[in-house]
Amino acid sequence: MSLPLLRRELRANYKMILLFTAVITLYSTVIIAMYDPKLGASLNMMAESMPELFAAFGMTNAGATMLEFIINYLYGFILVVIPMLCLLLIAGRLVVRYVDQGSMAYLLATPNTRGTIIRTQILFLVLCTLFLVIYSSGLGLIASEMLFPGELDVSHYLLVNAGLLCLHLFLGGMCFFFSSVFSEQKKAYGCAGGCLVAFLLIQMLSQVSKQLEGLRLLTPLTLFQAKELAMESSEALMMAGCLAILGVILYIAAAQIFRRRNLSL
Amino acid sequence: MKLILRVKNMTKDYGHQRGVFDLSFGVESGEVMGFLGPNGAGKTTTIRTLMGFIQPDHGRVSIKGRDCFRCAAEIQQDVGYLPGEIAFMDDMDGMEFIRFIAAMKKMPSLERAQELLNYFELEPKGRIKKMSKGMKQKIGLVCALMNQPEILILDEPTSGLDPLMQKKFVDLIQEEKRKGTTILMSSHLFEEVEQTCDRVVIIKEGRQIAVEKMDELNKNHQRILILKFRRASEAAEFAARVPNAQTDGKHVTLKTAGSLDAILKLAAHYEVEDLETHRQTLEDLFLHYYGKENHA
């Protein structure tokens, strides 16, 4: 691990991370503020008027409890997509951008092994993932307690967030993998972004109609089952574990390939 | 002499006749080796293998006896490298970048970096993105030289530098040479290597044409002289007395290698109005070697 490199990445990326945390803050607080045990009914009515649209974003019913409400409106789409975009952009900036531009030559022209460099970049992306998930869950917790003290089932809320962390470890790992194996930014962003869009579209389609439900098996997003996690379903816990393991495998594969490949710098 | 840097039967084939094929040369300790060839000849590919960025298909590339790909990080402790293409992290300012690279190189002090900055009269303030090519090249040189490495690998080091800075660069290389630094520098200009190098590897289309001592090369390196005489009759008379001369009115054009002494002394008998000398181009030099190959 290289401390100067880690420090550089922090400097180079903090603005983008702050931008994404601002977006998360905005969405999360607005949605949490919208929670009202009585208003749930009217939101449900709205959902019933446009069932496909709401279902596509994973918002099937507003739920009776605060946790169900939050899961429905935040963990179905917003807290999946926003950190995902952030990780996609940073993953590209950590490896493929340097390789494509040629500045990787300067990093490798120092007495640091490729292993050291790639491990540092992995550490940075994992720290970003941790920060985004911990920030968004902390924010949700604080906002809920301030606006509706005692309404949130905190322990299960944290369990859902642990699942979200696993999901983002996987998604970040995938983006990092593409960033490490390609030499052109275009290709790396294309593949990683393409996969993410495909995952989302497939999930949305599978949630719209019963006939297309089978499609859910084609997207890894299915492995994040926020509602079931909140109910401590062992199956959902195992699925989240799978996501984390897949993430680790992708990171290791990325590092191994990067260490051995030819770099035209 | 001990070979510091060694390329042995190295082939890296990119297909379509691109790449390098069966390259073999060595650079001795304290030697300055020029690496000469036109653009696209494979100079940068060879340097990339020396830096451990790419692995050759066949053959061995080593620095101080260590494999360039497997031991890249250890080797980098002794190497200063200037990439052929300038690409910094353009979100940084010049000094930030130099400090960052110094930290990556685990350098305890920036003293030498500051000396080099002064030497190149460089104010590395402001975003790298907005700098001229010459300024970027200077920053690259500072990064390569600031940790006082015992081996320098420089890919087209003077590109983007104005003639004055090129001269300063040559002086700097000569100073490094006095310190005993082993240097490999690539170029597509003969003049550039002429002033600094002890030996030259010449490659074309990925194939090694020659490894020659600079003195040897200079001996064979032809000059083209164009003399203008006062009268056409003088020109004709002079041309008849020297080999390989062509006349065109008052002008005499001749090719010569080695010392000019005899020719100048002969010309002094006549009234000379003008004298131009041209260096043989790199292409001519290649022709010379190809010619030799064909005769063999």
Image (cartoon, rainbow, N blue to C red):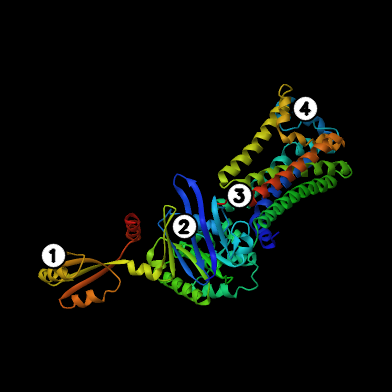
Labels 1 and 4 in the same subunit: no
Dot 3 surroundings within 10 Å: few (below 14), some, or many (20 or more)?
some
Q: Position of residue A238 (x, y in %)?
A: 82, 37
The residue that disc 4 covers is: A45
Q: Quadrant of residue A226?
A: top right
Q: Position of residue A187 (x, y in %)?
A: 57, 42
Dot 1 surroundings within 10 Å: few (below 14), some, or many (20 or more)?
some
Q: Chain of mark 2?
A: B
Task: Mark 3 vs mark 4: give the one in front.
Answer: 3
Task: Mark 2 vs mark 4: give the one in front.
Answer: 2
Circle 1 SS class:
loop
The residue that disc 1 covers is: B249
The residue that disc 3 covers is: A261
Q: Residue at x 80, y 37 (%)?
A: A239
- The Cα–Cα distance between marks 2 and 4, rounded to whole angstroms, is 71 Å
- The Cα–Cα distance between marks 1 and 2, rounded to whole angstroms, is 44 Å
- The Cα–Cα distance between marks 1 and 4, rounded to whole angstroms, is 103 Å
Q: Residue at x 35, y 59 (%)?
A: B289
Check contact, mark 2 vs mark 3: CB within 8 A: no
What kind of residue is marked 1? Gly
Check contact, mark 2 vs mark 4: CB within 8 A: no
The residue that disc 2 covers is: B43
